[in-house]
Amino acid sequence: MLEVSGLTKRFGGFTAVSGVSFSLAEGEILGLIGPNGSGKSTTFNLIAGLHAPSAGSVRLKGEEIGGLLPASICHRGIARTFQIPRPFRKLSLIENVALAAFYGQMEKPSREKANDIARESLQLVGLPLEESARVDGLGAAGLKKLELARALATQPKILLADESLGGLDHAEMEQAADMLAMIREKKGITIIWVEHIMGVLMRVVDRLIVLDHGEVIAQGKPAEVAHDPKVIEVYLGTDAADVQKTVADRTA
């Protein structure tokens, strides 16, 4: 569904992403992991159009999209969330999500249709549907859900979820991970998920790509990656045993 080949991004003399290549199958949940500064968010930004690649290719169902503007990429069916939600705080929840529905698609829906999409998206993530519901009443988990609802309202084929668990407690993390799995099941949306919370991520993803210093150092099934010596050395460290147990419990 998505083919990334030789993807590279340079900022002056600094290479943030170097020759990254991977494919994404339809219906898959792909985890993208690595240490801080490994190039995960830059890779997302290149796929979503926030940055133009210095080299390489990003193809969506065979069409080259690398270097297109974010709106054009969104209209083709790729939506992304951000680590730090920035909703329109003077608007209601439904207005926030309806705006995404209206501007996030190639063919703009009517106001009524945009509101219908907004209600469906809010219901999917478990947020209030009342027109009086405001952003100010949301905590960290609620803001993450609103960010996800806005992305879903663009009717994407692929969702790029950027650290959806940041700032959440353990119960909220588990709920958010289950929500991504449910979205894949109910909506048929293919997902790439960047996350640091390995124990939760490993419960959900089908496959993993591991970055370090902008390069792919491993990719494969969670069980393979969790036991990869290089991944343990540069990323998992003392958490390796816990991560391996999580994977083993999932496959038992």
Image: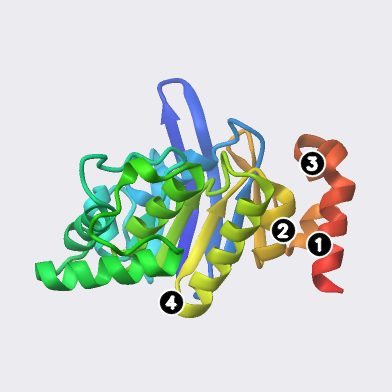
Q: Secondary structure at mark 1?
A: helix
Within 10 Å of disc 3 (Cα), the crowding (few <14, some 14-19, many 20+) is many
Residue marked by disc 1: 247
> Which residue is at 38% across, 38% downward?
54
Image coords of residue 185 (percent x, y)? 53, 78
Residue marked by disc 2: 202
Q: Specify the amino acid type for callout 1.
A: Val
Q: Secondary structure at mark 2?
A: helix
**C-alpha distance separating marks 3 and 2:** 12 Å
Q: Are marks 4 and 2 in contact (CB under 8 Å)?
A: no
Nearest the camera: 66 or 35?
Answer: 35
> Which residue is at 28% across, 58% downward?
74
Image coords of residue 7 (percent x, y)? 47, 47
Image coords of residue 175 (percent x, y)? 60, 60
Work out whether mark 3 precedes mark 1 in sequence or the reverse, and give the earlier one.
3
Q: Specify the amino acid type for callout 2.
A: Met
Q: Secondary structure at mark 4?
A: helix
Residue marked by disc 4: 187
**C-alpha distance separating marks 3 and 1:** 13 Å
Picture disc at residue 236: 3
Q: Are marks 1 and 2 in contact (CB under 8 Å)?
A: yes
Question: Is residue 219 in sight in this rendering?
Answer: no
> Which quadrant is home to the N terminus?
bottom left
> Which residue is at 69% across, 55% downward?
200
**C-alpha distance separating marks 1 and 2:** 6 Å
Q: Specify the amino acid type for callout 3.
A: Leu
Q: Quadrant of residue 116?
A: bottom left
